[in-house]
Amino acid sequence: MITIRNARLLDGRIVDIGIEDERISCLGECRGNDELIDAEKKLVIPPYFNMHFHLDSAFTKAMNRSGTLWEGIRIWQDMRNRISEDEVIRNALTAVKLFVAYGTLWTRTHVDITERSFKLLRAINKVKEESKDMADIQITAFPQDGIFTEKGNDELLRKALENGVDNVGLIPHNEITREDGFRSIKFAFELAKDYNKDVDGHIDETDDPNSRYLEVLLKETIENKWEGRVTAGHATAMHSWDSAYRFRILPYVAKAGITVIPNPLINVVLQGRFDGYPKRRGMAPIKEMLNANVNVALGHDCVMDPWYPLGIGNMLQVLFMAIHLDQMTGFEELISSINLITFNGAKAWRVKNYGIEIGNEANLLVTDADDVIDLIRFMSPPRFVIRRGKVIAKEGKYVLFKGKWEKVKVK
């Protein structure tokens, strides 16, 4: 049994937290001395979600000279042919360990299945298996080059689903024509229903205000009765849509139960590259979506790959950037912003028993912050990361991997 003394919860209460048999067994005054952790009246919260990432390209460290999404795609198309399966595994494991050290226990990764040998998918499947004792990973079959841009890509997507991936991916704005974009969305839902999978798409990741595939996605979601099982990654074109259109369409997004996943670190780097000044921020407007009751969760997207040269796997950096880009600096906005990497992700993932309540699975972060504002200000790693009642990471430096403590090294 683990007892966490003097834990400050999100509602301000200071309690003891008792953990037994992988679950929270006590909140209040808890007895037990098998293992004691003194939180010292610092914040204790549920762990983070990273709802959009690319483990297959992590730490490939390619130089993108224009900084555009399109150059990144061209670099990756060449790189994916040269990278070895073992190298992908090593890089992806490093990324997962960093996420865990910084408090992220759920990561949804997109794997490029238009690499026709499927070595990337094999590699990430192995990483998912090797990481299962320290993190939950979902794999989205991602048709990076598009579903109908090249003959046979649609069958690659189907084959990936037969190889046990968790979600159906798509990228309609990368199809050659608008008609193919519409067709790709319909095809993704056909596969989702055939294989009983969620839909997890790259949607409208462009500055083009005429890119409006989100409306097609939500219509298909409602018609196929797939509410609550669809996420729209990036949706950066929303930043360029006129206000009247957003006002009309966002309530339908909420009705369809679609979660929108901005990726602030990467969105702000890739978008607006063709602008002079002033430059668009290029991130889907979070406050406006929340006001329309749209579920919004955040993704880290990339770490040191053809699209982003930085990153250490800390979801607080992602949240910090989101707050600045959308000017979410009011007191209540800052306090509630933690939901973007916690409870909103749990809703999209459909995680049950999430949060610090008696009977829930004991997944906790013991931080060094007095409150949420200090947590975001300093972006420090948790002192302790607890998963299913066991300490699996300490001080942002050490993770428990395959029964042994090891120091996490940033590549």
Image: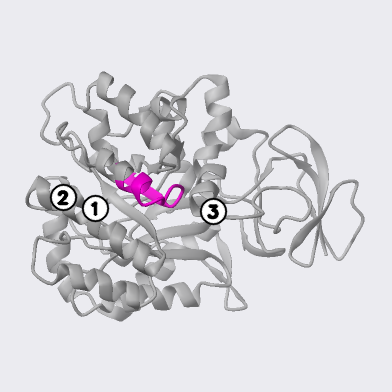
Q: Nearer the viewer, mark 3 or mark 1?
A: 1
Q: Amino acid at mark 2?
A: Gly
**Circle 3: is it few (<14), some (14-19), or many (20+) Cα within 10 Å?**
few
Q: Which residue is mark 2?
A: 181
**SS type, badge 1:** helix
Q: Quadrant of the N terminus?
A: bottom right
Are the two marked residues, 2 and 3, in contact with CB atoms closer than 8 angstroms?
no
Secondary-structure class at tag 3: loop
Region of the chain picked out in magenta, as a range: 220-234
In the picture provided, is 290 more to the left or to the right than 89? right
Query: What residue did someone put label 3 on?
Result: 350
Left or right: residue 214 versus residue 277 is right
Residue 254: mark: none
Cα–Cα span, label 2 and label 3: 28 Å
Q: CA distance from mark 3 to mark 1?
A: 22 Å
The answer to whether residue 355 shows anywhere in this view is: yes
Total numbered badges shown on the rendered structure: 3
